[in-house]
Amino acid sequence: MKKIIEIGIAVTLLLLGSCTEFLDKKPDIKLAVPKTLADVDLLLNDYSTLNGNYPTFGEIGTDDYYLTRQRWDGVSNYEQRMAYIWADEPYADIVQWQRPYKVVYIANQAIDILGKSERSGADEAYRRGWGAAHFYRAFAFHQLVGIYSPAYNASTAGQELGIPLRLDPAVDQRSIRPSLADTYKQIIADFKTATANLPVVEGVKGRPHKAAAYSALARVYLDMGDFDQAYRYADSSLMLRPELLDFNNLSVSANFPIPRLNVEVLFPALGTAASPMGATVALIDTLLYDSYSNDDLRKKAFFKPNSNPLNSHYFKGSYDQSNTLFFGLTTSEVYLIKAEAASRIGRLDEAKEAINTLLRSRWDKDVVYTPVSGSDGERLLRIILDERRKELVFRGRRWSDLKRLNLDPRFQLTLMRNMGEGTYTLPPNDLRYAYRISETVLELSGIQQNRR
């Protein structure tokens, strides 16, 4: 990328020279266009763009935390304040939409270059770039569809609106919104291309590899309610990367106890700044905090006490070892996907093995762990879903989980915000689970707004 930037600067300086000199000798501006396999590698090493700034509106709308009226009034970003109470009003902020599409644009550049390359598809470097570019594009699409489209229901997905699928780096093409079904088909196709081409071991930190692609597919299929495929891909991912952090080896009382790029991280991805979820702003839901056993080390690793209001808690358990929200893929999430999917398709022993493997790694070693047991599939599923929420708190999955679980009457929830004199609610399957697209985006693109 540095090489490309330097070429671009050189061309710019030439263009800023005297008119006479420019007319005498025109610079070859094609030099500024990335076109080689090395250029692709540089494009895909842009960590800050490809691994960061994914949309946070969904996480802002979840029930894992709350704000007092005073804290809510203090949130400077107006649209994020409105997202917290699920206000159904026009948005102007384009960051939530724009940043993932920047990832898509870079991925499409790489795919376009490689598609025109004479390098063989059997070439390892070529396949690595081809797989990574498709992974990044699919990951960005999936993040967007989780915010701006309704929950995936196989019986209605063909009629619901998905998100624009930009598959070419050209910027002058008209954007359209395909169906939700077609959107998920594209995401799956891209991730499957990634699984077929990515290496098992990736030497560059932050770049995707085969286990990451398998886990991404497991996540997508879980959102779709296809539990057979979710189980299959979760199992495939864990066969390659089964490692878990032992929380007994963490300094759980530290400000940020979970190491960045630790053994659980399959693919790191971070969210945009979310003012309502700031490190000293968001207060952890009391019932959620109380649901952790005192022998569960996550209770100390994830949260720190706060005295205002009394007996409240902040979150400190980011997998980025910072105040930034972590939305990436981890083996801990994959164990949960395997456990849930296995329980739903009748593989109860495997479901118990997966959830117990995860929980043992979180349990105080000085206290005997009592494994999840029994043959009641309904009870087991509820335990797994509870543990999923506790493990993935502030990890970018709760909004999608609420949406998909609301399709099942057993797990429907009505969310509520109490703001002094006002109370705001979000019923199950409400149209506001698909956030409004920015009016600025609509004006520039002409695409259709979500139903209201």
Image (cartoon, rainbow, N blue to C red):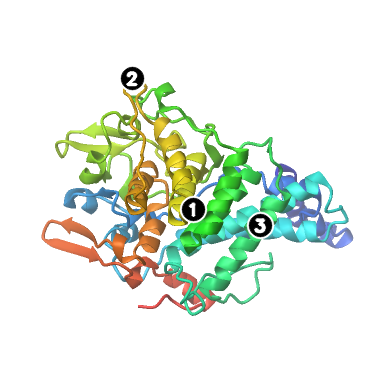
Dot 3 alpha-carbon crowd within 10 angstroms: few under 14, some 14 to 19, many 20 or more:
many
Dot 2 alpha-carbon crowd within 10 angstroms: few under 14, some 14 to 19, many 20 or more:
few
Question: At label 1, which amino acid type do we have?
Answer: Tyr
Mark linked to residue 192: 3
Question: At label 3, which amino acid type do we have?
Answer: Lys
Left or right: residue 159 compared with residue 202: left
Left or right: residue 59 compared with residue 264: left
Q: Nearer the viewer, residue 441 or 83?
A: 83
Residue indicated by mark 2 = 366
Q: Image quarter for residue 174?
A: bottom right
Above or below for 43 versus 240 = below
Q: First in sequence: mark 2 or mark 3?
A: 3
* Percent of width and height locating residue 3: 75, 44
Question: Mark 1 or mark 2, which is nearer to you?
Answer: 2
* Percent of width and height locating residue 313: 24, 37
Dot 1 alpha-carbon crowd within 10 angstroms: few under 14, some 14 to 19, many 20 or more:
many
* Percent of width and height locating residue 37: 80, 49
Tell me the residue at 62%/58% (across/down).
137
Q: Residue furthest front?
A: 375
Question: At label 2, which amino acid type do we have?
Answer: Asp
Q: Does the residue at mark 2 contact the one at mark 3 (Cβ under 8 Å)?
A: no
Q: Image quarter for residue 394?
A: top left
Give the CA distance from mark 3 to mark 1.
22 Å
Above or below for 83 versus 353 = below
Give the CA distance from mark 2 to mark 3.
43 Å
Question: Mark 2 or mark 3, which is nearer to you?
Answer: 2
Q: Residue furthest top?
A: 366
Residue indicated by mark 1 = 54
Question: Mark 3 or mark 1, which is nearer to you?
Answer: 3
